[in-house]
Image (cartoon, coloured by chain):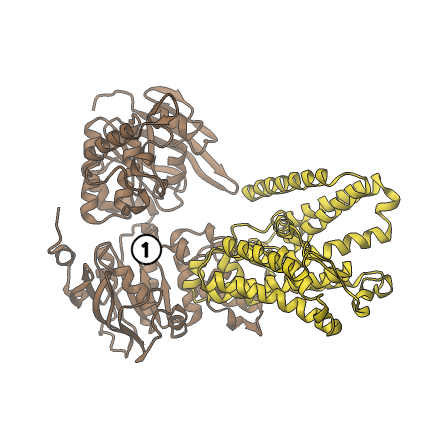
Amino acid sequence: MTQHASPPRGSTDKVQPVGPLPVWRSLVARADVRTLSLLGVLLALVVVGGITKPDEFLDTRNLQLVLTQASVIGVVTVGMTFVITSGGIDLSVGAIVALSSVWATTVATQDFGFAGVLFTAVLVGVGCGLVNGVLIAYGGMVPFIATLAMLASARGLALQITDGKTQIVNIDGILKLGERDSYVLGIPPLVLVFAVVTIIGWLVLNRTTFGRRTVAVGGNAEAARLAGIDVRRQRLYLYLLSGLCCGIAAFLLIILSGSGQNTNGNLYELDAIAAAIIGGTLLSGGRGTITGSVLGVLIFTTITNIFALNNLQSDVQQIAKGAIIVAAVLVQRRTASTT
Amino acid sequence: MAPEPPLLSMSGITKSFPGVRALDGVDLAVQAGEVHCLLGQNGAGKSTLIKVLAGAHQPDSGTINWRGEAVTLRSPIAAMRLGIATIYQELDLVEHLSVAENVHLGHEPTAAGFVVRQRTARASTARLLERLGHPEVDPARLVGELSAAQQQIVSMARALSHDVRLIVMDEPSAALDPDEVDNLFRIVASLTADGVAVVYISHRLEEIRRIGDRVTVLKDGRAVAGGLPAKTTPTRDVVALMTGRNVEYVFPQRPTAAPAGAPVLEARGLSRAGEFAPLDLTVRAGEIVGLAGLVGSGRSEVLETIYGARKPSTGQVLVDGSPLRPGSVRAAVRAGLGLAPEERKAQALLMLESVTRNVSVSTLSRFSRGGWLDQRAELGAARAATRELSLRPDNPSVPVRTLSGGNQQKAVLARWLLRGCRVLLLDEPTRGVDVGARAELYAVVRRLADEGLAVLLVSSEVPEVLGLADRVLVLREGHVVHEAPARELDEHRVLDLVMEGSPAS
């Protein structure tokens, strides 16, 4: 006997039967076909960008820009991934980002400086998440409806606060975070925040009881309830988490644009859902992957960037995004049915 | 019987799925007007075979002859056009449509090609329901409002609305009460009298004795016996063919002395309005108490109320003498209760997940520190718990959906074993579990009781309750009508008690 049945490490995204496989096969199995194919798509896009606009696309500044743009929607997507994994949906993320960003940039809030703005952005996000969560978990509302109502009212409130005007930020500490001086080893602070949120999200989903319960609730809520899991409290926490991510994203957006606007975060809900789905998270719940979601976000952001560099209009971008969603889901169905 | 060609003959049918050879050269010959029973354990290939017959799966090789001619069943529609209808165990009805709309789904009577003639549809549906012995079902009612038995009738009416020559019924009696089963058999008899062939799948040998003409036994994707006489082949032989072993329902030995442990679970005056009347019940450590009764007698409701999944109208549940918070599953689980529910897939299992994660889901906090999971400890504990129940395969990392019914049930039991639960509530523990695996499951339950667990068992199969339980409570329409040690009861006595006063057929 030369082969030892090594104790299986917790596979991240899906269950692999553990047996004495050849080394290369177990490596591939562990890295998981879906993640590899997403990486392949991303690499292909980089190649396309490098060929069509070699000087501009591969320029450090451009790559920094792409990552920065991915950061805001990326943080939102991490929260969305949890919600979808639990079998829910959060349509209000874009509106919450808008409301958080304007509430945190009112003249009154800015009086409290950097901490005041950050605190308010996060608090408003969590507050909106709390309302969503209570309505869904304890009020028995369907997530689609509850968060649709939040979408409408948060947008409305954001408009009321700003009266449609852009609220300029004049706190140096915040503005400075968007400047090149504060880059760490060439990495913008926004991207660092995104990376930290991603890592924490991955750990929470894959290595904690909270993540396991999220998957259980999404896979079979009734079974989870009868197994003794507090399904309602879990749901409440999940919408709080999504709201928290929106608050963080709002703060990143404030840094990025130096302002707060009621039109911020427009259609973020659709981008976040699309990124999660092409990443491999099941819309019906029970399976979620942070890695896939982040790759989904990077793919979308890279496409947008390449199209913009090549002077293609946003309508073409939209069509391409739609095609990618369809293609990704079709490929996933195929790989799912052959495994 | 005259040597006319069979209505249907399938020969050498093979079908493989990735990693599994589901059918390995199966032959099946069905004559017009006979009830041909298909027997086999779970995973023997029964459902794959009927899906091939229904046109839902394409065989890899083999031929199908229909009334003497070779045919290809390319799709369910093709099968239906030939006159082959299938009634699946999971009925494929649209709940939000009416009975008549369901019956005529896909072939609605129309005027001018697209306007549905509702009146015609309803009239012809009413005629079909009349023929099936259920004239009381209103064709205009929504299917979702009907009972399980009535929905099955609708499913049959749909089959008959086509010009059908062969009906496949997949465990049609599983969800039915005895008198409903009688009606089902009456329908089967009248169909065969009209020359329609019925392929009948059931786990219950006594049913096959009653209505079957011939039996084909499947094992591991092969037909190990074809065309046996259903009425005269000894049970022992049939079971031997199915399992490859000589096993009948073997119930484990009861302990010689009556269990005299302390009362662990008590219900006092527990009731739910409209479901069951106030009842008292005590289960001692080491004791198995059985609840016998018909579907609708309140058995499952009693269990779920004890478990906190339903809120009682009156009364309380006590564990070790201290009352549980009513209507709280979490309080029940914390006090040491565990439920293996009737609908395993819908109520107990996370089908996308591994056995390990299904077993550990109620015990996660034990493997975590500040929410952080120790996956090695989790896997080790799950492995120990599943080994103790000899769950197969002996690898807790496989997805739970790949397990047989009996092993899925063991995964649920392992969950509670791992949790260290003291009261096990079993709701129809052997539903969907094949004959060979049942005896093993019975032995597991008895062993757990011998180790000091208190077990409350619900089953619609009276022999199961009598064979496994120490003490039996008979429920009828929400009332406990009798309580006695199991060895003082027999099946006839229980059935009498269960049916007494009810409009027997």
Please name whichever residue, B128 or A31, is drawn nearer the observer in this view of the structure. B128
The single residue placed furthest to the front in the displayed view is: A163
The residue positioned 67% from the left and 66% from the top of the image is A121
Give the crowd class for mark 1: few <14, some 14-19, many >=20 residues within 10 Å: many
Of B59 and A277, the residue lying toward us: A277
Q: Is residue A18 visible?
A: no
Query: Residue, x 31% and y 68% (percent of image)?
Result: B306
Quarter occupied by the C terminus of chain A: top right
For the image, the number of numbered tags is 1
Give the image quarter of residue A189.
bottom right
Camera-side residue of B439 and B92: B92
In the picture, which chain is brown?
B
- Give the vertical position of B496 relative to B69 (above or below): below
Evaluate whether residue B483 shows in this view.
Answer: yes
Chain containing mark 1: B
The chain coloured yellow in the image: A
Viewer-nearest residue: A163 or A265: A163
Task: Name, please, the residue furthest toward the left.
Answer: B501
Residue denoted by label 1: B430
Residue A89 is situated, as x and y percent measured from the top left of the image, at 54, 54
Q: Amino acid at mark 1?
A: Thr
- Answer with left or right where residue B285 lies relative to residue B232: right
Query: In the image, what residue occupies the spot 22% across and 63% down?
Result: B276
Residue B38 image position (x, y, % from top left): 31, 38
Q: Position of residue B234 (x, y in %)?
A: 22, 43
- The answer to whether B418 appears left or right of A2 in the picture is left
Would you place residue B51 above or below residue A281 in this image? above
